[in-house]
Image (tube, rainbow, N blue to C red):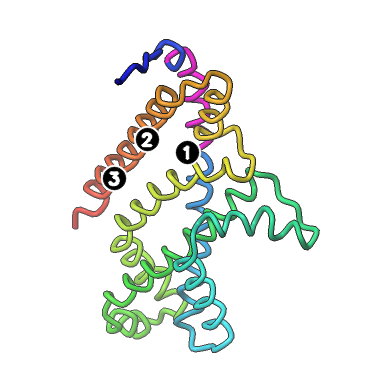
Amino acid sequence: MFSYTFHWNQAFRALPQMLDGALVTLQIALLSMAIGVTCAIALTLFRLSGNRALSGFATTWIEIARNTPALFQIYMAHFGLGSFGIHLSPYTALLAGIAFNNAGYLAENFRGALKAIPETQIRAGRSLGLTSLQAFRYIVMSQMLRIAFLPTTNQMVWAILMTSLGVTVGMNTDLAGITQELNARSFRTFEFFALAAVIYYLVAKTVTLAAHLFAARMFRY
């Protein structure tokens, strides 16, 4: 028979602590996206550069990021690099692993967005006296980011959820880490993790809604 007694009061008393963890989760996700977008743009340019070495480097990064588990990537940042004397804190390893994963997925998004932009626009820019770099910066980049904006938002949500993997490398200041510690002290697994799931859901939905409102305002034309 079902005989479990819920004790939600313990979970609700810990809500401020869990919300502090949610802020750390959001911070890691935002930083990983900033790093990921920067690396993804570079990887996209490398892959389309025609230089075999740069293209090979970008392709290898993208293939590893997209075809291996995110947990593996975080483990390699924390434990793998430690084998070579490079010791990263749980926070840094989690950030590095998620940023690496983000860059791989976003590079493919950006490459697809670039393919959707007619090459005639670049030639038109060159005919007006722009250099290749200026044509890319002023003509192509803005359109690429516009096309890839909503897929990038999906990656942001994925980054938020990926932060929960930090508990595997000892991360204890984000939402998942704090929830795990609270559960270890109280053994109220269902209550704490159910509340954490609601917080993850609300954060993810808020980011998605904000992104759609931003896109509707900024990309009306």
Q: Position of residue 5 (x, y in %)?
A: 37, 13
Instruction: Please tell me which residue is depicted at 57% across the width and 40% down the height of the picture.
Output: 167
Question: Mark 3 touching mark 2, by CB under 8 A?
Answer: no
- Residue drawn at point x = 54 percent, y = 30 percent: 180
Q: Would you name the residue on which mark 3 appears?
A: 214
Residue 56 occupies quadrant: bottom right
Mark 3 or 2: in front is 2
Query: Which quadrant is the C terminus positioned in?
Result: bottom left
Q: Earlier in the sequence, mark 2 or mark 1?
A: 1
Query: The N terminus lies in which quarter of the figure?
Result: top left
- Quadrant hosting residue 177: top right
Residue located beneath label 2 in the image: 203
Asked if 83 appears above or below 134 in the picture, the reply is above
Residue type pointed to by label 3: Phe
Other residues around mark 1 within 10 Å, as few (<14) / some (14–19) / many (≥20): many
Give the SS element for disc 1.
helix
Q: Secondary structure at mark 3?
A: helix
Which residue does the image show at 48% across and 73% down from the upper left? 63
- Magenta range is 12-26
Q: Are marks 2 and 1 in contact (CB under 8 Å)?
A: yes
The amino acid on which the numbered mark 2 sits, given as a three-letter code, is Val
Label 2 element class: helix
Judged left or right of residue 107, residue 198 is left
- Residue 26: mark: 1
The x and y percentages for residue 53 are 59, 86
